[in-house]
Amino acid sequence: MKSSILNAVLVLAAMLPLSSVSSRATNPAAPALVNGYQPTWWKEAVVYQVYPRSFKDSNGDGIGDIPGVTSKLDYLQKLGVNVIWLSPHYDSPNADNGYDIRDYRKVMAEFGTMANFDTLLAGVKQRHMRLIIDLVVNHTSDEHHWFVESRKSKDNPYRDYYFWRDGKPGPVGADGKPTTLPPNNDPSFFSGSAWQFDPKTDQYYLHYFAVKQPDLNWDNPKVREEVYSLMRFWLDKGVDGFRMDVIPLISKNPAFPDLTPDQVRHYGDAYANGPHMHDYLQEMNRNVMSKYDVMTVGEALGISLKQTPLMVGDNRHELNMIFNFDAIRSNRDGSKLKAFDLPTIKAIYTHHAEQLDAYSWDTVFLSNHDNPRLVSTFGDDSPEFRVPSAKLLATMLLTLRGTPFLYQGDELGMTNYPFRGIGDFDDIEVKNAYKANVLTGKVSEEMFISNLRHTSRDNSRTPMQWDSSANGGFSTATKPWLAVNPNYTEINAAAEVADPNSIYHYTSKLIALRHAHQAFVYGDYKDLDPADKSIFAYTRTLGAERFLVVLNFSSGPMAYTLPAEVKVDSLVMSNVGTTGLVTGTLNLAGWEARIYKLK
């Protein structure tokens, strides 16, 4: 915890304009600035997301668990990551794989016990790493004590913990009786209406996600204090912060007017940034986060890049950083995948550099538990180019501006799963969409499954591939909760750890390079050739530390001429074994990545 005097100094410093950098840096009470940035551990971290259900099964029941994570801490430490983000581990009926929480102070029985969690946390600390956990407080499970009480009667003390509304008058039914319609036209992210009728009290409750995930009413101060209390519970245990699930949705317009047709098409944006979102985040920071040395990162659904500084600016006292989805969705057209366009993604990173100054920190990521596999989406997962393209993507993620987030299996180049039918999927989003689209005849099953092979969240949720034994070494169960990708015999951790030229070891070297050179953390960023459709060339510079990164996003060889002012000193890394210096023109192999030190 910071002293009140130091807190006051930092608050005043954060409010100073960029022109005040020199005077702020000389203040003996504040840490020295680096290129205008206030240095902190979470800006310098490399984060690795663990999806515990799919990471490692320790007891043979087919489900990954906390002891399984603990057993692989040495593997993560050797990779070089220094922050682990653990996806939800709380008690849950698993309607949405743990994102429907029944008890925030208990560990999911399938994952182990609180003692197992404490052992994991101690193991992380012993290895000089940190642990952040998911905070899922836009909604709970309908089996949570609060909701069980809330639905009992209209005058129950917990009634206002959630949103209950009368329906609208509907047409007369076939039986001659009047019917009711949902209170408004809000759609659910998981298909259908966001309102569920409950006959117990003849009212509807709001659920932006699954029917079993009712939304909490943050306008009720009792709800907010309940949230702050559970946050303190975990922070006092020693966790190092939170990844905050769909946090921009916590504030709603209690009038719930109908959405316009355009809002219905972009309902995620319509739900975000409600009337009191900033008030609640500032209150959360004031009451909880400011009292601990921790990191916060928000899943910023519906928040534009222009709005980002309002959530992460130093003088805003809300969150440290957020996930902006512009890059990860740069090749999406709604729910469908479209051709990758390199100038588009380069423009996104340039806009980030322009919009986010030294007081608004960024994140860098292209994969997580809600998106398909990294190399299958942004690289080339063919046998010829899977390894170099996975290494190229790692090069980009670990040398761009912002805290990088890696997802489990990225360091192995794990690929999308070859889904054949609806029975291969577990995801509730897929199952609901199948009912809404295939069973109603809107799309053919063949087209539906074909699209999901490229876009489904279950692509990233298949079990971690540890070795070439049955189930990829994930579990000794006859049938894991989700099938292991059949390519585990070729793609697995044991093989890559044993191979000095593997994606795993290349990623480890990149992480070490980032840790060794602050130019990759706090340095300036410049795209040298925004319009090139195949080459991404940029510099990261901080004083005497000057680096050039060149990435060939194509399978064919490319000759790329450097700008005259860019003078190469030495080659630092190449993902295909290139050695030696160049003068002016780089002859790049397909999917080659190089990092140079500049003169």
Image: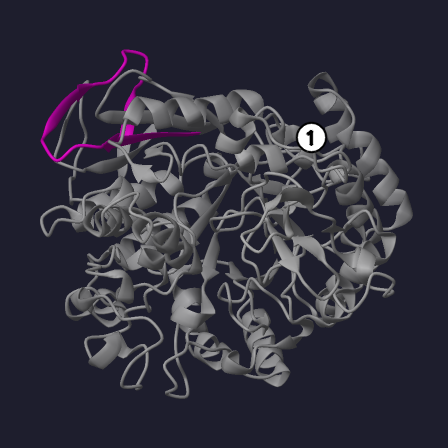
Residue placed under numbered mark 1 in the picture:
310
Span colored in magenta? 545-569
Residue extending furthest front? 176
Quadrant where the image shows the N terminus: bottom right
Q: Is residue 236 above or below residue 579?
A: below
Q: Position of residue 470 (x, y in %)?
A: 21, 81
Residue type at tag 1: Leu
Determine whether, in the image, residue 519 is placed left or right of residue 373: right
Q: Find residue 33 and report its horizontal and vertical position in percent.
A: 66, 33
Residue 283, percent across and down? 82, 45
User: Quarter holding the C terminus?
Assistant: top left
Q: Is residue 264 magenta?
A: no
Residue 27 can be seen in this image: yes
Q: Nearer the viewer, residue 503 or 20?
A: 503
Which residue extends farthest top?
564
- Is 549 included in the stretch rendered in magenta? yes
Residue 425 lies, with reference to residue 269, above or below; the image says below
Judging from the image, what secondary structure is the residue with disc 1 in? helix
